[in-house]
Image (spheres, helix red, strand yellow):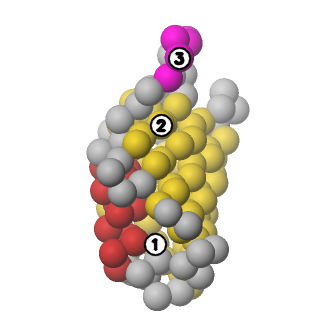
Amino acid sequence: MPKAYAALFAAAFSSAAVVSAPALASQHDGTWAVSLVTKAGDCDPSVRSRIEVRQGRVDENLIVARIVGGVNSNGAVSLQVLRGSDSLNARGRISGAVATGSWSSPSKNCSGSWSAVKA
């Protein structure tokens, strides 16, 4: 993702407020320190931020983007960032207090990996 898009993605992660219908707390709930690394495309080489997961969900409406997704009971992570016609998809898995995965932005022709540690 171009540098401005990487900054948007980082801002989305760092300010992710969580909105969810009442549900049982997820074992994966909490604050996660996230690190993104670009492996292909014209993107920032790396971005670090935080994400908050509550009741297994992330759902944020920012002025410049919408972020939706969550973690299922088996630890599978799925997150999408939408900004106009641009999109970014992140997938991965949580195991204990560590998570890893990949991300891609077909609209910006960038991709990479991410990792996270529960704070």
Q: What residue type is disc 1 on?
A: Val
Q: CA distance from mark 2 to mark 3?
A: 11 Å
For this view, does 98 lie left or right of residue 15?
right
Residue 102 at x, y = what percent? 60, 63
Mark 1 element type? strand
Q: Disc 3 designates what residue?
A: 21
Choose mark 1 or mark 3, whichever is in front: 3
Q: In the rendered structure, which disc, 1 or 3, sits on the residue that comes first in sequence?
A: 3
Measure the C-alpha gap from mark 2 to mark 1: 23 Å
Q: Amino acid at mark 3?
A: Ala
Q: Which residue is mark 2?
A: 59
Q: Is residue 108 magenta?
A: no
Residue that mark 1 sits on? 37
Q: Amino acid at mark 2?
A: Asp
Which residue is painted at 32% across and 68% down in the image? 7
Q: Is residue 51 above or below residue 102?
A: above
